[in-house]
Amino acid sequence: MKKTILALVVISALVALVGCDPFGSSQTMSYLTGTIYTDAAMTIPAEGIAVELVASPDSATVKSQIVYTNSSGVFFLNIQFYPTVPGEESGAGYSMPSTATVGLTAYNGAATYVYKTVDDGFILSPGDTLAVWPIDLSAFGGGE
């Protein structure tokens, strides 16, 4: 009887652990979106513009990534927050960061538009959805 109860406890614990996926949930994700247009009147969407989320090279909290605008000129970034490893002196386990500072840059060929740099970037928290201001290609500099 004791073996049966022990087996049920172990199986229950395994089922609970398998059912809990803290990564990819709303508590560990943040979202950033915006729209880019080809004209100053902001009526014609710009498709295929690269938008880069820039994380600090020293950051283990979020990773840099690139997405492209869709046919409506909209880009959408799914930003995964990763747990941090505490220092050896604390002895505690992993912890989830409460914020991350990121930069955002859009590219149209050699021309760029910097929404914000990493040094003076957007501060995101898990669960946030941030919509940045719409821009048009005339705001891009350094290229075409």
Image (cartoon, helix red, strand yellow):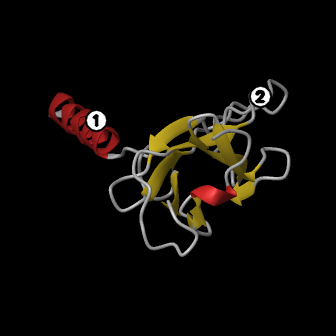
Residue 41 horizontal/vertical position (percent): 54, 75
Q: Going by the picture, which residue comes out furthest to the front?
A: 144
Name the amino acid type tagged 1: Leu
* Image position of 143 with respect to 34: above or below: above
> Residue 73 is drawn in which quadrant?
bottom left
Q: Secondary structure at mark 2?
A: loop
Report, in whole angstroms, how far the alpha carbon at label 1 lies from the one at label 2. Answer: 35 Å
Residue 58 horizontal/vertical position (percent): 77, 28
Please tell me which residue is depicted at 51% across the width and 37% down the height of the picture: 66
* Image position of 10 with respect to 27: above or below: above
Q: Is residue 125 at all visible to an observer of this figure?
A: no
Please tell me which residue is depicted at 65% across the width and 34% down the height of the picture: 93
Please tell me which residue is depicted at 67% across the width and 43% down the height of the picture: 112
Name the amino acid type tagged 2: Asp
Closer to the eye: label 1 or 2: 2
Which residue occupies the foreground of this view, 137 or 121? 137
Residue 11 horizontal/vertical position (percent): 22, 35
Q: How many numbered discs, if any? A: 2
Name the quarter where the C terminus is drawn: top right
Residue 35 horizontal/vertical position (percent): 50, 63
Point out which mark residue 14 bears: 1
Disc 2 target residue: 58
Q: Secondary structure at mark 1?
A: helix
Point out which mark residue 110 bears: none
N-terminal label among 1 and 2 = 1
Which residue occupies the foreground of this view, 104 or 123? 104
> Residue 26 is drawn in which quadrant?
bottom left
Label 1 Cα crowd, 10 Å radius (few <14 / some 14-19 / many 20+): few
Which residue occupies the foreground of this view, 35 or 104? 35
